[in-house]
Image (cartoon, helix red, strand yellow):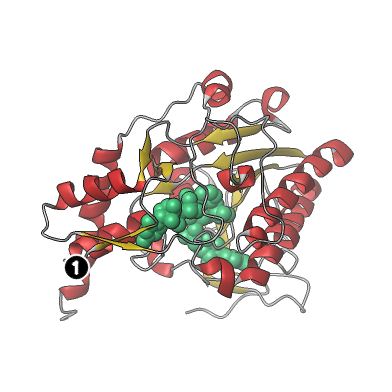
Amino acid sequence: GKPPENPTENPQQRVQIETQGDHSDDRPHAIVTGGAGFLGSHIVDALLDDGYRVTSLDNFSSGRPENHAHIETARFESVRHDVTESFPDFDRVDQIYSFASHASPIDFRANAIDIALTNSVGTNHALQTARTHDATIVLASTSEVYGEPEIHPQREEYRGRVNPRGVRAPYDESKRLAEALVSAYHRQHDVDARTVRIFNTYGPRMRRNDGRVIPNFVDQALSGEDLTVYGDGSQTRSFCYVSDLVSGIRALAEAPRERAAGAVVNLGSREEVTIWELAETILAALDTRAGISYQELPEDDPSRRRPDLTRAETMLDWTPSIDLETGIRYTVDSFRQQDELRQVPSGD
Ligand code: NAD
Ligand code: UDP
């Protein structure tokens, strides 16, 4: 690759430009942290489709350069950057999507401190840049802020029930702090900060070994292995397909400032299923002889989860449209395509 061309005036910053974008036009500029990850890379695509100039800031800890391999426009730039360090300087910033953070529970132990700092210190850096440029910032929060919920479905006013010292705490509690920071910058400095509480979302570009339930089950089913259901499988989740989620996030980012600044909105699917039903759906979609193997339920695993979507509907006129069976089919197809790509010899 090309050597970095003085990307920042601060020599202490370890900034490495992976792909150099074209800064010559005056289009609106969006920054996506975690832009090489699953959700971040789909947001990058949506922004490029809408004419933005886009910079991804990612340390590639769980993100992958392949997630940008299809991008041909010079309006895109990928910068290797750890958001726990202050942001590089930019000439102009219109929108920031603060999406950097490991999100799979299997990472909550090994990367606990990283996660806590990425969501707190990293979000603070994103907010500082938003303040400097008077940009709109969208924070990726999570349904995990509700913890083990006492009300069902969960609406935004609910304050949650989180174990502050549990194995999930570095994630849940740092997202809660990130929300507190977003509210503080909004109140104290009038930053146009908006928060989305994302409920379980899945789709193409999730890593096969991500550890979250849908990539796990699809990977196992494709390999003819039994699906690992944790506990008795009676716990529930509501799974949203990625394109639905991304359209909701873009709607939130584009909503008028008077209506959306400072707002928090749930986004996800209202189709609640048990993990056992999810396993059956995936087995049926693949028509495989694989079965189910029951394993121990992880600590603090929430027993049920479904978003109240009233606010998203009224504020953003948004509702998810892809049902679980269809979304699973798209995901299985994309995992199969990845397999085929890997098997094709790279002959010149
Ligand atoms: P992902 O692991 O695919 O993406 C996370 C990205 O952040 C990766 O590209 C990773 O390399 C990058 N990253 C991590 N730490 C970083 C750091 N310190 N500096 C720079 N980059 C860093 O996961 P995802 O599912 O795409 O999640 C993206 C965001 O959405 C996360 O903030 C997550 O908490 C949130 N979220 C996701 C879901 C979901 O169901 N997918 C649900 C709730 C919230
Ligand atoms: N799960 C499972 N088998 C797996 C992975 C996850 O049964 O191989 C369960 C997990 O215990 C949880 C649900 O599926 O109840 C969703 O887990 P995931 O890690 O995807 O996300 P979470 O909502 O827990 O953050």
The quarter holding residue 138 reads top right
Residue 55 percent coordinates (x, y): 57, 57
Residue type of the residue flagged with mark 1: Ser
Q: Please indicate whether residue 157 sits to the left or right of residue 53 in the image.
A: right
Please indicate, yes or no, whether residue 71 appears anywhere in the rendered image: no
Q: Please indicate whether residue 338 sits to the left or right of residue 316 in the image.
A: left
Residue at 65% over, 61% down:
166
Residue 287 percent coordinates (x, y): 11, 52
Residue at 54% over, 61% down:
299
Q: Secondary structure at mark 1?
A: loop
| Circle 1 residues within 10 Å: few <14, some 14–19, many ≥20 | few
Depth check: 80 or 325 in front? 325
Residue 230 percent coordinates (x, y): 38, 58
Count the marks: how many? 1
Q: Please indicate whether residue 217 sits to the left or right of residue 222 in the image.
A: right
Ligand 2, image quadrant it occupies? bottom left
Q: Is residue 101 above or below residue 5?
A: above
Residue at 23% over, 45% down:
281
Q: Where does label 1 land, which residue?
A: 223
Q: Is residue 331 above or below residue 244?
A: below
Residue at 56% over, 80% down:
3
Q: Is the residue at mark 1 in contact range of ligand 2, meaning its CB lies under 8 Å from it?
A: no
